Image: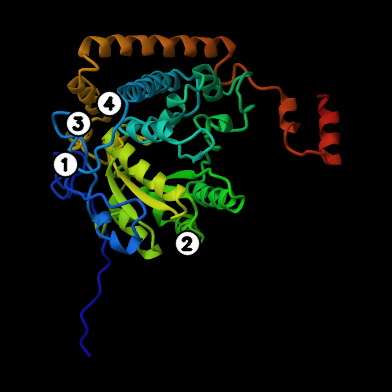
Amino acid sequence: MNRPSLSLHIPEPISRPGDPPAFHNMSLPAVGETRRPDELEHERNMRDLPYGLIRVLDDQGTPRGPWAPRIDPQVLLKGLRAMMLTRAFDERLFRAHRQGKTSFYMKSTGEEAISTAQSLLLGKGDMCFPTYRVLSWLMARDYPLEQLVNQIFSNEKDPLKGRQLPILYSARDYGFFSISGNLGTQLGQAVGWAMASAFKEDDKIALAYVGEGTTGEGDFHEAMTFASVYRAPALICITNNQWAISSFAGIAGANETTFAAKALGYGLPGLRVDGNDFLAVWAATEWAVERARANCGATLIEFYTYRAAGHSTSDDPTKYRPADEPEAWPLGDPVDRLKQHLIALGEWDETRHAALAEELGQQVRTSVKAGEAVGTLGKSKPSVREMFEGVFRDPDWRVIEQRRELGV
C-alpha cells in the first residue's frame, strides 16, 4: 500500500521578534454578550460558557451586560490602590535585583486585577493557593511591605527564616498558602484543603492559581478529577497570560480550544473571563464562590490576560516576542481600565491618581530602605539555629546532635 507520510505539527506563534504584534486570531465577544446563568444551574446547561468571554467594562469604563456587579466605590478604590502598590513595589524590587540586592524577582505587571479582586472578595478564613504572580493578593490585605522586602533580601528579619527563595511568600494569617517553585503542586493541595473543609462541615473554600502552561502537567488533571468527583468547594483559576516562560500558549493547547473548555471533560463549569477587567474578575469569582458555598462544587475559571513584563529577572522577552507586543494587547492595562471606570463614576480624577502614585512610591521606598538597613543579599542572614526550629515537634536525636556540634 502506498500510504502518505505523516508529519508532526509544531505550533508556532503568529509573531516573533522583529515582526509587528499580531492578535487577529483572538476571539473577543462583545462587552456584555456572554450570558450569565444562575449560580445553581446544572453544569450540563452551561457548556457554552467556556467559549465566550465575560467582559463588563467597555472602552469608556462603563459596565455593561448581565455580569455587571454591584461594588461599593470604596472597594473599587481599595482595589485600585492595591494594584498600583503592587506595580510600584514590582518596579522598585526589580531594580533592587539589578543592583545585586536580591538574587531573583518576578513582576505581576498586567495581571494585578485578578488576585486583587479575588483577595477583596473572598473571606478571611478562605485559603488562596498562589503562584508567584499574585502579589496583589497580599497588597489588597495590607500585608506589611517591610516583611516582603526582608523576605526578598533573605536577611536577618526574613519572616520565613531564609527557607524560601525570594518572592516565594507564605502568609497564613492573610489566607495565602506557601508558594511552591514546583508548578502545579498547589492545585492538589487546594482541592484537598477544600475537601477537608467540606468533610469537617466548615464553610471555608479554597482558591488556586495555575498558569496556562502548567495545565499540561499531571497535577492539574489529578486535581480536576478530585474536584469533580468530590464536589470540592474550590475555585481553580488558570491565568492564561499568553506566555509560559518563553513558550507561547499554543504549546499548551491554546490553538485547539480555550483553557476554560478543559472543564468540560470533568463535568465542571468553565468560565472564560477578561482578566484585565477588575469588574469581570469580581463578577465571575462571586458567581463561582456562591456556587461553591451552595455545595455545587468547583468551578474552573480561565483569566484571559497578558504577561506584560518578562517571566522573571532571568528572562528577556524581546528574544521571543515583538518588543512592543505588551502595548498592543487588545484588552488594555488593568490599572488604567479601573482608573477610567472610577473617573466615569465621579469617584476619581487624574490629580488624585497622580498623588496616590507618588504616595505609594514613597511608601515602597521607605520600606525598601528599612530592609536595606537590616541587610541585603548576603550581607545579613537568619541565624543558623533557624535550621533546627519548626522542623520536628519532638527533635530527632540526629538533629539534637547536629545542633550541639554547631553550638546553636
Q: Are marks 3 and 2 in contact (CB under 8 Å)?
A: no
Distance between the alpha carbons at the discs numbered 4 and 2: 35 Å
Q: Residue at x 43, y 14 (%)?
A: 364
Quarter of the view holding residue 327: top left
Q: Is residue 68 above or below residue 135?
A: below
Front disc: 3 or 2: 2
Q: What element carries label 2?
A: helix
Front disc: 1 or 2: 1
Which comes sooner in the sequence, label 1 or label 2? 1
Q: Is residue 262 above or below residue 126?
A: below
User: Pointer 1: what residue?
Assistant: 31
Disc sitting over residue 225 in the figure: 2
What amino acid does circle 2 point to? Thr
The residue closer to the viewer here, 147 or 197, is 197
Crowd tier of the residue under label 4, counting other residues whose Cα lies within 10 Å: few below 14, some 14–19, many 20 or above: many
User: Pointer 3: what residue?
Assistant: 327
Which comes sooner in the sequence, label 4 or label 2? 2
User: Pointer 4: what residue?
Assistant: 335
Residue 304 place in picture, x, y as percent: 28, 44
